[in-house]
Image (spheres, rainbow, N blue to C red):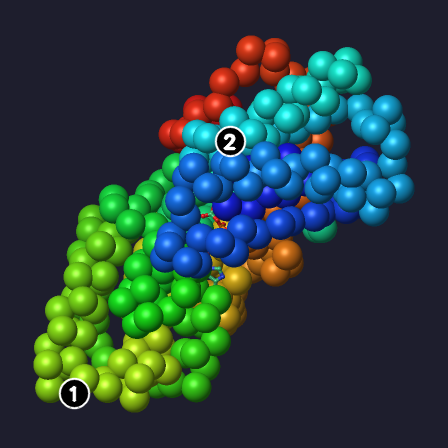
Amino acid sequence: METSCDDTSIAILRDGIVLANLITSQWIHKKYGGVVPEVASRLHVESILELYAMCLEQAQVKPEEISAVAVTRGPGLLGSLLVGLSFAKGIALSYNIPLIEVNHLHAHALSLFIEQKPVYPLLCLTVSGGHTQILKIESDFNIHLMGQTLDDAAGEAFDKTGKLFGLDYPCGPMMDQLAKSGKPNFKFPASKVPGYDFSFSGLKTAVLYFLRQQLSLNPSFIEEELPNLCASVQHAIVHMLESKLVQAAKELNVKSIGLAGGVSANSELRSTIMNACCLHGWELYLPALRYCTDNAAMIAHVGYAKYVRKEFSTLSLNAMARYPITQTQ
Ligand code: KG4
Ligand code: ZN
């Protein structure tokens, strides 16, 4: 079960194979230009029971056949996490089966291997609406955080700049689409952060000031230049991600690369990293598009690995709004 933000998702796996993976996205947040936590948790409550019934039906599984229930413990919105956690506890208690906690970031990273055999060591760039990190993964349960964003996440950079262009939340998919017919002819400075860390808040401010200046000269600037603006911002974000990932792979001498999280659905990021991997002779692992954004199959995937290791939680398990990946091992 996954309810960490604005997607309610339930999946059923048998022996590690996905039988069903249902997701309901809460479109209402578009109206507010971002996720409203109270609304998100209320909508999780409204949809989770029906989603569970639909998931059982699609998987052709009876509730009493389920052997364990895995749920996202964090990181995420506390109210949203609590809905999934309480529901999972209810099922664990009713059917007397183990409860398994999963770190959302751990699940994103291992989503690369839902449908293929894992290859380690692997350098994984997890890029989502809430997180941007480079992980060195030695095995399913031996993960080192090498670098992360110091402020906004890459997905947030798409969402916040997209909002300035008047796009609906979440703006990443739309910017990706619009950028296809544009050219990156506006240059925005890349942030200078040491090591493998990132910073995206400067980009948002640079875009804001640039727009203010251009709009004072031409009030239709955004309408006229939208595809080029999207292509330019996307190029700036992708370039920052690529340069840190390539630097890390070279310095750490890791020859397998992975992309995970919602932003890994971005077409320019995928093609840029693919080219870099071809150039350096590295293997690239990409999750299927349905496993890039938030989904319960990735939670169940880690849950299954923990089930095999008999790593169970008690019913007193709490949700954690902040939950660093390093704390899960
Ligand atoms: O992993 P995810 O579903 O949720 C979090 O854990 O945050 O990621 C959502 C983020 C949003 O910021 C959304 O704008 C971004 O992923 N996103 C994209 C694309 N698809 C989703 N960003 C750029 N290009 C895309 N194609
Ligand atoms: Zn996520």
Q: On the rendered structure, is 164 left or right of 281?
A: left
Residue 80 on image: x %, y %: 50, 34
Q: How many marks?
A: 2
In the rendered view, would you say 115 is above or below 311? below
Quadrant where the N terminus is found in the figure? top right
Q: Which mark is residue 81?
A: 2
Q: Which mark is residue 218?
A: 1
Mark 2 or mark 1, which is nearer the start of the sequence? Answer: 2
Residue 139 on image: x %, y %: 57, 35
Q: Does any portion of residue 86 appear in the rendered image?
A: yes
Q: On the rendered structure, is 259 left or right of 291?
A: left
Label 1, ligand 1: CB separation under 8 Å: no
Amino acid tagged 1: Asn
Residue 227 on image: x %, y %: 37, 82
Question: Which residue does the image show at 76% across and 16% down from the upper left?
Answer: 94
In the rendered view, would you say 21 is above or below 280? above
In the rendered view, would you say 279 is above or below 62? below
Q: Which element carries disc 2, helix, strand or loop?
A: helix
* 194 or 17: nearer the viewer: 17
Question: Which residue does the image show at 34% across and 50% down from the upper left?
Answer: 153
* 3 or 302: nearer the viewer: 3
Distance from the alpha carbon under mark 1 to that under mark 2: 45 Å
Amino acid tagged 2: Leu
